[in-house]
Amino acid sequence: MNDRDPRLDPWLDEAARLEREQPSPDPVEFLARLRREVHESAPPSAPPRPSFATALAASVLLLVTIGFAIAWSRTGSTEPPFAAAPPPEIPDDLDPEEVSLLADLDAWVRLAEAGGVPPEDATALEVCDDLEVLQSTDFDAFLASLMEENG
Amino acid sequence: MLRFQSGDVTAYETLVTRHLEFVHRHARRYVGDFSEAEDVAQDVFLRLYRSAARFQEPVHFRGWLATMTTRIALNSLRTRKRKRWRHAPEDRASTTEWKPGAGPQPSDSPITGDEAALASERAALLHAAIARLPERQRTAIWLQRFESWSLEDIGAALDLGIPAVKSLLHRARAALAGFLEPYFETDGRVASTAVSPHSTPPEEGTPRP
């Protein structure tokens, strides 16, 4: 089989010429039809336009958020407006190990409450605030005894 | 293309006008029918409109057009075949006489006279032979010989390097020469002993007749 067969080229040329003599669509009519289609179909990648009510709700939410932020900054407080509970106060003169222990303070209080110790119970709060007790190896036994006392 | 990407609608319409003839011609090679080819062209240009921003390399725009036209035309053919099988089983027999993709029928040619009729018959035989080629070989031969595209442009359309395009064209020409061998002897006149180029297409990679 010869791909350089000289008899093939005249056939190809002739077929190409005949094909070019075939009619083509009228560009003006085709463009008019295309314009109609383009206007009727929105681009698929375009995000849907939000309704007026959605836009209004988003604006109100944004304004409320900004209002809170301004009010918070004016108080000069470092406390976030939506915080559930204040973080434990950490003295400035603590070493890193003590800071680590204090970071767990809130967890210890919750543990004590779970064990039946009321939050207002002075003993439990004293335990949690007392760094020496927190650092002692007897703390677990002490906490267990507190829970036992409170049922 | 760059103007169109920046949102210039006039540039889009210029692109459509410039490439409409090619897209329609290429679609018609597959679907055969003029208005169906127009529908394919419309679909191609609508997709172009919607995906303008995705063109990273506008230099391959013509390749994208050729690929998209081929895909949409083949989809259109599949849809048409499904409809025929579902609604008109009697049409099945007629599809063996002339298939979309076999190029214009001899009667489509506006040229008259014996020589013109013979030229038209040769063209129909050639298109029927091209229709038997595997898809990529078919597209490569159409783009090179009917559209005068460079090897580089054909490579962009088929996502192939130039050596692969050369190899594709080599195989396509060899297959076409094989299919048309009986007709070369008679200069396109259908001999009674000639093998029809409409006979069962060979599979890709199998030896050609």
Image: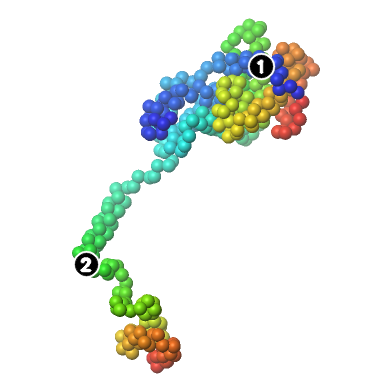
- The chain letter under disc 1 is A
* Residue sticking out furthest to the bottom: A149
Residue located beneath label 2 in the image: A76
Q: Which residue is found at the position 51% from the left and 31% from the top?
A: B60
Near-viewer residue (B130 or B84): B130
Which of the two discs, 2 and 1, sits closer to the camera?
2
Residue located beneath label 1 in the image: A9
Q: Decide which of tag 2 and tag 1 comes sooner along the chain.
A: 1
Q: Residue A147 is drawn in which quadrant?
A: bottom left
Three-letter amino acid code at disc 2? Gly
- The chain letter under disc 2 is A
Apparent side of residue A35 relative to residue B70 in the rendered image (left or right): left
Residue B80 in the image, given as x and y percentages of width and height: 59, 31
- Give yes or no for contact between labels 2 and 1 (Cβ–Cβ under 8 Å): no
* Residue sticking out furthest to the top: B113
Residue B15 in the image, given as x and y percentages of width and height: 44, 26
Q: Which residue is found at the position 65% from the left and 21% from the top?
A: B127
Residue B154 in the image, given as x and y percentages of width and height: 58, 28
